[in-house]
Amino acid sequence: MSTETVKKSSPVAPETAAIKIWLNGRLVPKNEAVVSVFDHGLLYGDGVFEGIRAYGGRVFKLKEHLDRLYRSARAICLDLESTPAQMESAVLDTCRANAIQDGYVRLVATRGPGDLGLDPRKCASPFVFIIADRIALYPEESYTKGLTVITASTRRVSPQALNSNIKSLNYLNNILAKIEANQVGVPEAILLNNEGYVAECTGDNIFYVRGKRLVTPPTAVGALEGVTRNTVMDLAPGLGLAVEEKFFTPYDLHTADEVFLTGTAAEIVPVVRLDTRVIGTGAPGPWTGKLGAAYRELTRREGVRI
């Protein structure tokens, strides 16, 4: 276990009643932020989104998140009708309106209202909303003692059916795996692809450490190209870890020295037990601690000022 004490940020958000939502170009009170029942994002999951973090008055990796949002939108032929610069301003305006210094931003773009059919041509224009609030996926204890996770029987949607690099509103696959975790009283589940290779978790990417190698699944296996995932892969060589993307099975996790998850909301969280097996020593490992410290240091000095 790392000797460093892991300290999680405690985002401060305004009172719920005072929250302002950016809704297609205007800021409105939370109780006035409504979406049409004919919106294809609601009816069919037809849309894309990003989860973004703010630390110390800066929005972290905003360009990377917006780049991915626009790639996802292009992949589903969704014209967002705004430039990345305009979307960046909207994110910052929403953070300012809610006095966000440390918090979480959810940016959602749907196909917009249409009719009850599938045809996206019936949707006149996209519908975009932005929420700036706070989120806590795991309790503090998860970072100091580690998570217990399971391998879900639900399989990851094949990238041949829906490319995993599209961060879409279609999350039922992930939710079914999350239900499996809930049913056995653990916080997270690992999804395998149809060939039995590890893809990702319900809301996070996954890594393991063996020796001085850091390994994560490639996007071709069905993993999202996570912004936090990429940040960790950039940080690791400077700490002495060789990074590798490769196909692997649960066996590699069961026999790893360390396992951890990454995500914008989760940040870096250790895994100490998978199914019935103890991972490594059964405590968060030193490399996980070093990467967590390096990541937190990066969030303190980088980002777009609010």
Image (cartoon, rainbow, N blue to C red):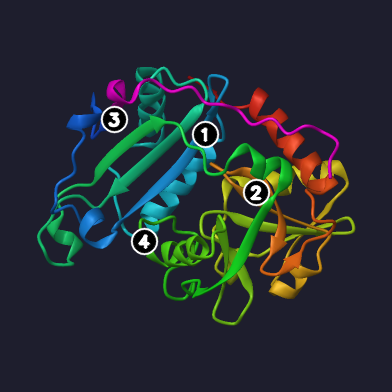
Classify 13 as above or below 51. above
Q: Residues within 10 Å of mark 3 (few under 14, many from 20)?
A: many
Check the picture and name the quadrant holding the N terminus. top right
Q: Which residue is mark 4?
A: 170
Which x, y percent locates residue 286?
Answer: 85, 45
Seen from this angle, which residue lies furthest bottom? 195
Tell me what residue is drawn at x 50 percent, y 71 percent: 156
How many angstroms separate mark 1 from mark 2 (CA)?
Answer: 15 Å
The quadrant where residue 29 appears: top left
Frontmost of labels 2 and 4 is 4
How many angstroms separate mark 4 from mark 1 (CA)?
Answer: 22 Å
Stretch of the chain drawn in magenta: 1-20
Tell me the amino acid under the disc marked 2. Asn
Is residue 77 highlighted in magenta? no
Q: Which residue is mark 1?
A: 53
Tell me the amino acid under the disc marked 3. Trp
Is residue 14 highlighted in magenta? yes
- Magenta segment's dominant SS is loop
Tell me the amino acid under the disc marked 4. Asn
Q: Which residue is mark 2?
A: 230
Q: Which residue is mark 3?
A: 22
Q: Is residue 248 visible?
A: no
Q: Earlier in the sequence, mark 3 or mark 4?
A: 3
Q: Earlier in the sequence, mark 2 or mark 3?
A: 3
